Image: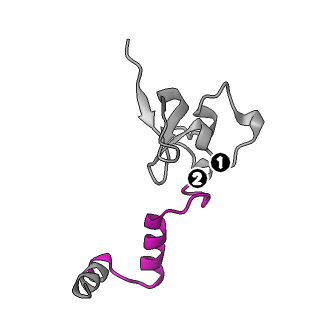
Amino acid sequence: MSVDYNGCSVCSEGVYEEYITSCEDCGKNICIDCIVNAEEDQYDGGYIHPFSNNDGYLKREHCPYCSGEIITDEILLGYLLNKYDLDKEEVLKEYKEGQ
């Protein structure tokens, strides 16, 4: 009998598979200790399933990335590229030419 461990994208801890799942939106692995927007009475013996959708993925509102609790450089870059209608490849080319 084997036990599957998965790493959390937030805390980097390796946890048992029943305490971690992927976000339905961004796909990052989130463990039970790193979910957000949850009330104490929602926890079911420490398992992640009360915060998951019917497909077993973490609901967007419980993901620290998708809910805006954690903002990475990747998220900021995507936001700025979209806001200013920039193409990432063009920005990279411009950056390389300026070096």
Q: Residue at x 56, y 41 (%)?
A: 53
Dot 1 falls on a residue whose secondary structure is loop
**Is 53 in front, or is 58?**
58
**Percent position of residue 90, x then y:** 27, 83
Task: Name the amino acid, label 1.
Answer: Val
According to the picture, the residue beneath numbered tag 2 turns out to be: 64
Q: Residue furthest top?
A: 1
**Percent position of residue 36, x then y:** 65, 48
Q: Residue at x 61, y 48 (%)?
A: 62
Q: Quadrant of the C terminus?
A: bottom left
Q: Identify the mark nearer the N-term, 2 or 1.
A: 1
Q: Are marks 2 and 1 in contact (CB under 8 Å)?
A: yes
Identify the mark at residue 36; answer none if there is no mark: 1
Q: Is residue 38 above or below residue 4?
A: below
Circle 1 packing at 10 Å, graded few (<14), some (14-19), many (20+), is some
Circle 2 packing at 10 Å, graded few (<14), some (14-19), many (20+), is many
Dot 2 falls on a residue whose secondary structure is loop
Judge left or right: residue 14 versus residue 90. Answer: right
Range drawn in magenta: 64-89
Judge left or right: residue 75 versus residue 62. Answer: left
In reply to whether residue 49 is colored magenta, the answer given is no
Q: Quadrant of the N terminus?
A: top left
Q: Is residue 66 above or below residue 16?
A: below
